[in-house]
Structure formats: C-alpha cells, structure tokens
Image (cartoon, coloured by chain):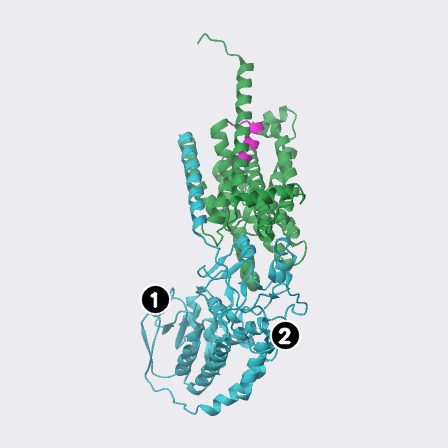
Amino acid sequence: MGKKINIKEIIYVKTTKNFISIIFLALILIIIFVLSIFLGPSKINPIEIIKIIISYIFADKTNFILSTAAYTIIIKLRIPRSLLAIITGIILSSSGSTYQAIFKNPLADPYLLGVGTGAGLGAVIGLTIYPSNLPFANFGAALFAFGGGLLAVFLTYNLSNYSRNLNHLSLILAGVAITSIMGAFTTLILITQNPEIKPILSWLLGGFSLASWEHFNIVFFAGFPCVILLLVQHNKINILNLDSKQVKSLGINEKRTITLLILASTLSSSIAVSQTGIIGFVGLVAPHISRMAWGTNPKYLIPQASLIGAIILLSSDIIAKTILSPTEIPVGLITAFLGFPFFVHLLRKEGNING
Amino acid sequence: MFKIIIKIFVLQIFFLLLISCYSDTTHNTKNKPIQLNPIPPAGNIYKTKPALTPSKPSANKKIKELNFIKPKQPVLATKSIKKKITNDNKISPATTYPLIITGTNKKNITFEKSPDKIIAFDSAAVEIIYALGGENKIIGTHSFVNYPENTENITKVGDAFNLNIESVINLEPDLFYIFFEQYIKQLENNKIKVLYQQSLNDNFESIPARILMWGKILNKNQEALNTANLFEKRLNNIKIFFKNYSSGPTVFYDTGSLWTPGNNTLVGQTLNLLKLQNIAKDISGYKQYSKELIIQNDPQIIITSSPEYFLNSSEFKNLTAVKNKRIITTNQELLSIAGPRFIDGIEELGLAIYSPIFNKILLSNIDK
C-alpha cells in the first residue's frame, strides 16, 4: 500500500462520474418522454405526430394538413400528461430524499410520512367546500392539500418524538398512525358526502388520466421553485446528517433550516398530490436507487434521484394508459408493483443494521 | 446485490413497456360507426316519416336552441296509461300459501303468510315495495336509499355494502332481502329468513318479474300486475318506436371523472335500446375511459352530470358534441336503480336526445 492517494484526483473522478450519471439519466428520461408521446390508447401515425409537433413548435407556419383530433390528443393531452408525470416524479423523489436526510431515516418518503394522505384529506375537504365544477377549484384544492400535508408531517414528527428515543421505527410507526387516521377522516367525508363520492374516489387512487395543461401549470409553478430550493440547499442537507451539536458548531440554525426544508418538500409534494392523487413508493425508491448506484452526496443525490423518479413515474404512466386500453388504470398501482421488491429489500437491509 | 436488483428493475420496466406496446396494437379504433340517422336538430328533420336510407350527415349544421333540453310531459303520458291498464286486466289472484320463492343462490324460501316486518337491503326493492303500497311493512334498509322521500325515517342497518348484523337481529324481521351474498350465512345462523336476489346489473327487462315477485310476497298481486304491465307497456312503446331505426348518434355516458358504463350494464342496455352508439361499448362494467379515445371517437352527444367540465376544458373544444352544444344532463340515479322508476330514466334520456319526435310518441300513446 505504498501508493500515494491523490485526493484531488479522487474528487475529480467522483465528480465526473456523477456528472456523467446525470447526463445519462437525463438522456433516458428524454427517450422515454418521446416514447410516451408516441404511445397511447389511440393510434396515431408516427409521421403525423412528428408533423403535429413541428407545426406546434413553429406556431402554424407550416402548411401541414392535420386532423384536429390528433392535434388535440398530442398537444393538449399527451404532452401535458407526460410533463405532469415527469414533474410529479421529480417532486416526489426530491422531497423523498430530503425527508430521508432530515429525519435521518431511510424509510421516510412523502407517502409513508402521511403527507400523501394528509394532502388527500385536505384536497377532499377543499373539494367538498368548493365543488370541482367551479372555476379555480383545482387551485383551492391545492391550497387545502398543502394545509393537510403540513399538518400530517407536523403530527408525525411530534408523535415520533413523543416516544422519547427517536429511531427509524418510531417515525415510521407514527407515519402509519397518521396515515390511517387521515385516511379514516377522508373515508368519513366521502361517506357523508354521498353523491359526490365517485369523482373524488377515482381521484384518490392517483393517476394522470385527467391531466391537462391546467394541472401541469399548477404543479409546475407551485412545486418547481421548491425543488430548486432543495437543490440549492444541498450543503445544509448534507450537514444535517451530522449530530445536532456538530451542526450547531458549524454555525447553522438547525431548527430554521429543518423548518424551511420541510416546508419546501411538503408544499411541493402536497401540490403534486392535490393534482394527481396519492402515488406511493416513487419518493422512497428513487433516492435509494440513486444512493446504491452513486453514493450519498446530496449535491448529486437530489438531481439523480429526481431524474430516476421521473423515469419511473413516466414509464409507469405509459403502462397505465396503454396496458388495459381503452380503460385507464391508476398509476399508483403500477408504482406499487414496481416499488414493492425494493421496499422488501430495504426492510431486510434495515433489519440487518438494527439487529 | 444492489446491481442485480437494479438490473431486475430495469428489465421489469422494459418488459412491462413491451407488453404495453403489444396491447396497443390489439386495440382497434378504425371501425367508426356508420351514421344512418343524424341527430334530429331543433325538431325539423323528423317532421316527415324518418327515412330508412342513409342520409347525408348534417353534423355541421349549427344548432343553437338545443342546450340542455329539459324533458316535458312524460308524467302526463304515464297517468293516462295507468287508467287504461286497470280496466284491461281484471285478474287479481290472491297469493296462495305456502308460497315458495327461489333466490339467486337456488335456495327455496317458504312463506306461510305475507311477511309483516321486512328489511329491504336494496334500493330497487324499497322502490318496488313503495310502488306496491307496502311501505308500512319496511322496518329497515341501508343508508344509501333516498327515494321515495319518506324513506329517511326508516331505520338504517348499514350502508350499501356493510351490514350491522346486531341491529338486524334487534329489529326481528320476518324477511331480510339482500342483493349480494356476503352476509347470508351469518344471518341464517341467527335464524333470520334471508331472500337473496342478485341486483339486475345488465337486464332491465327482468324488472317486471321482480315487481310481480314482490306482489306475491306482499299479497298485492293486483298492484304488482298494474305496475309491471305499465312498465312493460311503456318499454314496448319505445321498442316499437325504435324498430324503424337502425342506428342513432354516437354517445359518451360520463358518470363522473370519465367513468363510463360498458355494454353489460343497465345504462349500456338502455343506450342500446335507444339505438345510441356507446363509444365505450367494448369495456365491461364501469371503468375510467381514456381521454384520448373520447377525442378520437368524437361522440355526437355527451351525457354527463357535470357539463361544465366538458364545456370549459380546452381539449374538448373541438368535439362535435361540444360544438353543437349537445351535452345532456339527466337524472343518472334513475338509470342506476332497477326499480319501477327505471322506465322514467329511459324516457327522460330518450326525450332529452330525440326531443320533439320522442315526445310526440309518448303523447300519442294516450289516445290508443
């Protein structure tokens, strides 16, 4: 072992490796995005799709003869739907990796912490007070969802602290408890609001079947700034992995940072839930794949995990919209199928560490 | 270890993608229905006898007056028919006891006398019993029953799919009627007489038979015969009316969030009866229909409880139904309960779609 180790070289190699991985993931995402535009329940000639996209980009200066139906399907349905799947995947995975860092818990994700169900409850309350056929209903639902998601995270965190010894299990148990109580309230509202039950119920299952530009705009403008914030704050997320005494010694206000990060990730994931329904496992699985493959540095972890999450969700949505055509299946079903083996693997690994 | 898992995961995704590609090719949307009789706009086209030869589609004709037609006068028609029938049929046999009724589970239920305390755990059964004038015999039902109005006061023993067995036993019913199998054993163990008849999911023509069955049970055969005959007569009138037509406009029936019924549902059968071509006829039961296929199949009429959704969404702007303002709101509850009111639902839908001519047919029934 007489060989000298050049630290600069190691850092350089690691950085390039991470950069290459990000470019690689982005390329895969772009390929699947293109695929998602060409695949769908209605059969449209690929050449026509290309023509439609060209004429859309050049704002109708081309003289292609296009069918209105195909144009509407591509521009107003498939593109916003795929973009919504991508942004939702990014939001869920980036907030998932943030939660995992803040709570120092590999099992934390928006779904298991109760944010999903809390946001769902909030949105159901919002839609009950302000029915979905009125204008701006989506926006109102999103606001209520944020309130519900925030309440859920607050309750989960405090409930797990209540058990005095904060470990992985107590947080997850608290998350399960909060999820079930929020779910119970949602069911109660759905039962008492008898005639409105069907639209809300199908929305709760999660999916992009009703996606339009309006949904994408809400998620993008409310959720994307939060993702940017999480990306910028990667240094602080990294430091939060340390002991709280060490964090203090580095001159960081731990409480304020944690509050800010929780607010950002809860806001973005609640908005996503309010527009797409509850989609589980993506926020849990994506950061883990990224960590297994490329390490735990939050500077690269968050973008890598986001891209992986977007890839998973977008490919799941392609399956959801085509596999049982002409009917749609909830995308949450597909992500659960894909995520389950990972969850089992994580549980086994966790068991080894604790035991 | 993790590398293997990642490989498996990637393989899984590609495998599922492959499957989805293949399922895509099997679906065929090329066979667009040939339109023989275009939608009757504003009452002019059907003034003469409807032509059987395929006429040129007049989809581009602008229709302004037809937004949200409200049905008129089917009530008038029913009243007159009722009087006619009571004069026609004078057979009123009283039920002979012991009466044996066979349930869907092939179990024979024997009645020594007409039951006085009935728990009807089914919306359709409650409506039938009310229509036959046996409402004072109902002592319990489920909480989704909301018609007729005074059903609110009946004790509720559960919601449509969850039953509180304790409260059933507490009410001591002579007969418990249920439309699904789940709780039968538990109830029978507690010595409660259970009649199980599967709810009619795809066959509204059996509704008169159900009415007659309740007539026997309640010993109200005359009333049952009247109600059943009235139902059949009104149904027959519609059938006769549509004999001359081969096919009508294409429709999409939305029950909320694009959930739609297929052919093997009560609504699907109703659409067939009215010669409406359901664009979602291939699906089975109620499913969420793909938005893309609504646009591709371009229905001429949309039946929905939330018309604002279709009118305000930019992606539906170019649909024929939206352009022509043929978005119809009907009472969807009528077509979801296989009771005596079901025929009202059929007539309401027919009236809303074929407004002037259908109304004339309903009114002309009175004079016969």
Give the residue drawn at x 55%, y 63%. A194
What whole-number distance in Å separates the C-alpha atoms at marks 1 and 2? 59 Å
Q: Give the residue at mark 2.
A: B44
Height in image: B276 above or below B93? above
Where does residue B281 sit, x and y in percent of width and height? 47, 62
Q: Which chain is cyan?
A: B
Amino acid type, mark 1: Lys
Q: Is residue B36 above or below residue A201?
A: below
Residue A140 shows in the view: yes
**Residues at circles 1 and 2 in contact by the CB criterion of under 8 Å:** no
**Quadrant that contains the C terminus of chain A:** top left
Type of the residue with mark 2? Asn
Find out whether residue A322 is within the magenta segment. no
Give the structural element (helix, strand or loop) at label 1. Answer: helix
Q: Chain of mark 1?
A: B
Q: Chain of mark 2?
A: B
- The chain assigned the colour green in the figure is A
Q: Which residues are magenta?
A: A295-309
- Location of residue A245 by image quarter: top right
Q: Earlier in the sequence, mark 1 or mark 2?
A: 2
Residue A49: x %, y % from top left: 56, 44
User: Where, quadrant-wise, is the N terminus of chain A in this rendering?
Assistant: top left
Question: Element under label 2?
Answer: loop
